[in-house]
Structures are given as C-alpha cells and as structure tokens.
Image (cartoon, rainbow, N blue to C red):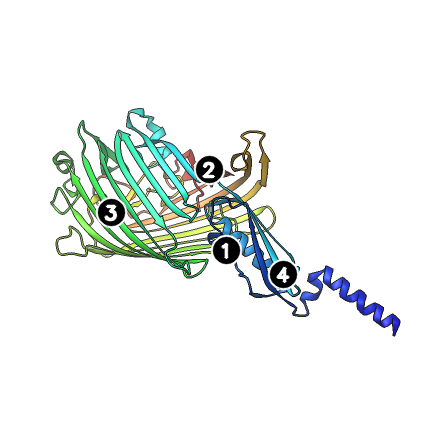
Amino acid sequence: MGMLRWLLVLSVAVMSSHPVLYAQTGETAVVGAITLRGNRITRESIILRELEFTRGDTLKISEIEEAIARSRKNLLNLPLFHFVTISHHKSEIPGLTDFDVDVSERWYTWVWPVFELSDRNFNAWIKDGDLTRLSYGLFLQQENFRGRLEKLHIKIKLGYQQEAMLLYEKPYLNRKKTLGAGLLFSVSRQRETGYITDRDKLVFYRAGDFLLHSFDLSAFVRYRPDIHFTHTLQLRYNSLHASDSLLLLNPDYTLSGSKEPGFFELSYLLKADFRDQRAYPLNGWYAEVSAAKTGLLSGDAYDFVSAKLVFRAYHQLNRSWFLAGSFTSRLMTRQNMPYYLSQALGYRRDYVRGYEYYVVDGNNFWLAKLNFKYALLKPAIMHLSWPPTAKFNTVPYSLYLGAFIDGGKVWPYEFYGNNGLKEEFLRGVGVGLDFVTYYDKVVRAEFSVNGRGESGFFLHFMAAI
C-alpha cells in the first residue's frame, strides 16, 4: 500500500507540472484574473474585446494555447501594438488560471508632410519625372484617439492639386462593443486631370485655373458582432464641378450633359478577416463583398447598381515557403458610364503586374493574382540604441523572394479613345523582393513581363495580395 500511495502522489505531481499530459483526460480550467501591462494609452476594454476568453470562462486545458494564439493574432491585427505576449499560470485561488497580457504600444499620433504625385502610381510618375505636378501639405493621423481605438485623420493639401479631408471613426458606441460609426468629409480641386484614355494610357490636360472641383460627404455605421466579421452601411453624397474646357475635350467625362453632376449612394460592405496579420499576411484568408445603389433620388445624375467581390488566401507550405492568391471582380448594371466613373484595371490595387503604365476602362472586370515566395530573412527584430523608446528602437523586419503570375480582363470596354487592350486578356509574370518592417511598411521591388512582351522594373509600397 505504501508503494501504491507513493506512485499516486508522484503521478499527480507530474501531471500538475505538465498540463499537456492531463489535457487528454478532458481537464478544464476556469479563467481567473486577466492582467494587462504596457497599455499606457489604450483602454483596457479595447484589449479585452479582442481576447478569445473572459473572466469566468471554462476552457479545456488542451485549448488554452490555441485560445492564446488566436487572441494574440486578434490584438496584432489592430493598428495599436508592435508586439503582444500572452501567458498563463495557476491562480492563488484554487481552480482558477490567471492570464497576463503584455503589449508594446505603437506611436499613435503622426504629422506627416504630404508630397503627392498627380499620377495613378509611383511608377507612372517616375517615367516622366515631372516635379511641377507635385502637391504638398500636412496629414494628421491619430489611430488611437483618446485610447479608444478611435480614428482621426485630417489632411490639408496645397500646390498642384488641393484637398481638405476629415475622417473620424468611433468603433464602439454600445456596451457590447459591436456598433460603431464614422464620418468622412472631403473637398478638392485639380488643375490637371486625366480626361481620356488613348493608347491605353491616361491623357492629361493641364490648365492655369482649376478644372475640377469635387465634394464628398459620407456617414457610415459598422456592426462587428465578433472578432472576424464586420458589416458597414454607408450613405454618401458626391458632387463634381467640371470646367467648360474639360467638357469640350471629352463631352463623355460626365455624360449627363451637366457641368455639376451630383448623386446620393447607399452601400453595404461585409468583411471577413481570418489573416494572421494585416500588413503582410502569411496565413489565413480575407474576403470583402460589397453592393452599392448609386442614385437614390429622382434628381441624381446617375442611376445604377454595382457589386464587388475581393477574396485573398494565404498558406504557409513549410517554414520558409509561402503561397498566396487573390481574386477580385466588379459588376455594374449600367452599360454606358461617364468617363470619370469607368475606371477598371490600372487603378489603386486593381492592376495586372507588368501593366503599371496602362489603364483599361469599363464597367466589369475580374483580376486574379498568384504569389509563390521564399523567406530570405525570416521575421526578426533589430534593437537600435537610439531613439530611447521601444516605439521606434525595436524594429521588426523580414525579406521575401517571390515569383508571381497575374491575369485579368475588362468588359464591356468603353470606347473613349484608340486603345489596344480593350476586352483583351491581360497577363503578367515576374519575380520580386518584398521587404517588411514596422508600422505596416512594405516595399516591393519587382521585375515583370506583360502579355505584350514588355518588361520593366517597378516599385510598390504595399503587399501585392
């Protein structure tokens, strides 16, 4: 009996020090105290909202590490923290497990000098290198206003193209932290604009006075029932004032025959986000589904419905190899669109690599991208001696070598000029280097060849997928 009692005591001690061993027996743990450290600005409620567990929850021992990993990923997907560490230990209160959450906050208030180019992207501008088309100003960016994850952006831009913009978003309006709302206001005026597409490139017209004046006002409500899904309902009003000289060059610029077309728009957006990180994902998936009704009143200049789908998937093949793919598509009910609303491929993120110098206009399009990459430098951290703050002297970095293939098509094509890419299957292949560092900064250097056999070296400043 003495030997049996000794073996029982020894077994209990071994299982207590190795939770993995007794996880198989279905043992559970009750969440006790959750201690937060490092959040000097961020409110505790913002952090607790992203955790997969709350005080009093019952977790299986085998599920604790998974819940910690998901909670850490949720917190890192907020634009608030550089690093997040979550640990757990037995509480002084029998039967409870306490959790410690340590965060390293980012710098939240930025005042950026604005130097913006009048082209669609950096590569299109650098081909001509015209510094007279530079706009300048200041951009105030606050991503954690009052420590409540509120977003406040103010931009004043002068020079060649002028703009004033205000964005305010409050993510949580109710106690459950599921409802949020925001407001976006923007006014701008331009001395130069792309007034037509010819030979698959934007043709710009420059005037001494301003050619275009635009006004945009949006109010939106967000519903976020859980960590991964967000619903946004937005009401928008947009108006444009085009000069006589611009409409003489292209009467289809507004198409409505009016120098001052305006319209209301109601849109809905669903986001599903299961990525491991926002700026440069390596695992998981992301999807957007949106629909918009443009023209709500009888006096609105345009009346049509549009829908857009975005899907991106990421997969880690092994410790060093990664695969990523995306598919984007847009559909519109109206066939004859005004020129300034007919932008399809070649704008923002919707372009086939290798065609950075070109644009294709039309109502509907699809775009597919595939990346295969290798981690030359796996994610690591470099500590600088200066400045003396962890917000800047702790620098994460990584470097990836990749190969890619893209394809896309626009239909029906809008015949605004002499263009050869109309309703043509666009395709591009290439190789590139992606450098990723802190504050969600990504620099891509790529060499690509398009379907016309043209090759080139291009720079981009966000992840391709």
Q: Tell me, for residue 444, which label it has, or none.
A: 2
Give residue 257's position: percent from left, percent from top: 11, 45
Give residue 304's position: percent from left, percent from top: 21, 56
Sequence-first tag of 2 and 4:
4
For disc 1, the neighbor class at 10 Å (few under 14, some 14 to 19, many from 20) is some
Disc 4 to disc 1, how far (Cα)? 16 Å
Residue at mark 1: 48
Q: Is residue 353 visible?
A: yes
Disc 2 to disc 1, how far (Cα)? 35 Å
Residue at mark 3: 217
Classify mark 4: helix, strand or loop: strand
Above-or-below relation of 131 to 308: above
Mark 3 vs mark 2: give the one in front.
3
Classify mark 1: helix, strand or loop: helix
Classify mark 2: helix, strand or loop: strand
Amino acid type, residue under disc 3 in the picture: Leu
Q: Tell me, for residue 97, which label it has, or none.
A: 4
Mark 4 vs mark 3: give the one in front.
4
Sequence-first tag of 4 and 1:
1
Disc 2 to disc 4, how far (Cα)? 44 Å
Q: How many marks?
A: 4
Please name whichever residue, 346 or 289, is drawn nearer the observer in this view of the structure. Answer: 289
Disc 3 to disc 1, how far (Cα)? 33 Å
Sequence-first tag of 4 and 3:
4
Amino acid type, residue under disc 2 in the picture: Arg
Sequence-first tag of 3 and 2:
3
Q: Are marks 3 and 1 in contact (CB under 8 Å)?
A: no
